[in-house]
Amino acid sequence: MNLVVLTGAGISAESGLATFRDLGGIWSQVRLEEVATPEAFAADPARVQGFYNARRAQLFRVAPNPAHLALARLDALWTRGDFLLVTQNVDDLHERAGARRLLHMHGELRRARCLACGEDHPWLEDIAPHSACPGCGAAGRLRPHVVWFGEMPLHMARIQEALAGCDLFVSIGTSGRVWPAAGFVAELRGRARTLEINLEPSEGASLFDETRHGPASRLVPAWVEEMLTA
Ligand code: APR
């Protein structure tokens, strides 16, 4: 049985990272048009860098929760088929929990991309105006390696290939409001079994064969246990 698991900000909520669209979420604090688009970066790079520098610094103050740890355990122990964890999150909690077969379709806070050479590199501190590319040395040409609205998500060919062959698709902690991730469940109808695990019904809840609503830190370990003992 080939598994594809999709995660969103809700899986990191209990680690202390704010989601985007819940009450008090990130997009109620700052307008995404001002910090999460190429136009915003062109207009005010310092504002955009500051937004991502603050979120990158926060990574040092949070830790994986039982949901991240359970998915890493499933990744390590699943032998009855393929496994791929696709996350919309840019935090590093899945890696720190031990996940290996993981793709960040919206990029990663802890990498910086160079506009001069196009390469992305590990990057843990603030990106400052004069920061130099670890690869080509160009100064002042680094941006967050995060996919902004209007940009193409990453690893889509590999994700589509995994979806084409999957038998069970599980969506965890995402509101189903942002494409293309929001469209994965509809693509799979009639071809794979689909399960939503979320605090409350997402936009696409009615498209899933099964939904389980409650906190990820409780529901995800229970589901993983079921998968490993079935
Ligand atoms: N356990 C499970 N689910 C939770 C929890 C929790 N403890 N807390 C919140 N949730 C759910 C909410 O009910 C909501 O449906 O997580 C979802 C979070 O939704 P969003 O804030 O919209 O985050 P996400 O779906 O990841 O957003 C997708 O939008 O802004 C862009 O690029 C950004 O990757 C992000 C994308």
Image (spheres, rainbow, N blue to C red):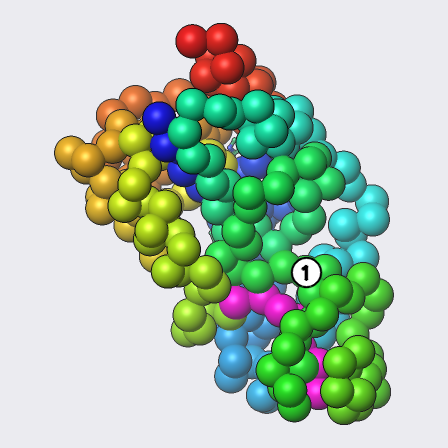
Query: As drawn, is 192 to the left or to the right of 172?
Result: left
- Mark 1 element type: strand
Query: As drawn, is 90 to the left or to the right of 186?
Result: right
**Percent position (x, y) of residue 49?**
71, 74
Res 131 → quadrant: bottom right
**Percent position (x, y) of residue 85?**
50, 41
- Residues packed near mark 1 inside 10 Å, few (<14), some (14 to 19) or many (20 plus): many
Residue lying at 37% horizontally and 60% vertically, measured from the top left: 157
Q: Is residue 144 magenta?
A: yes
Q: Give the range drawn in magenta.
A: 141-147
Quadrant where the N terminus sits is top left
Residue lying at 64% horizontally and 87% vertically, measured from the top left: 117
Which residue does the numbered mark 1 point to in the structure image? 109
106 or 165: which is nearer to us? Answer: 165
Residue lying at 71% horizontally and 70% vertically, measured from the top left: 121
Vertical position of residue 89 compared to residue 54: above or below:
above
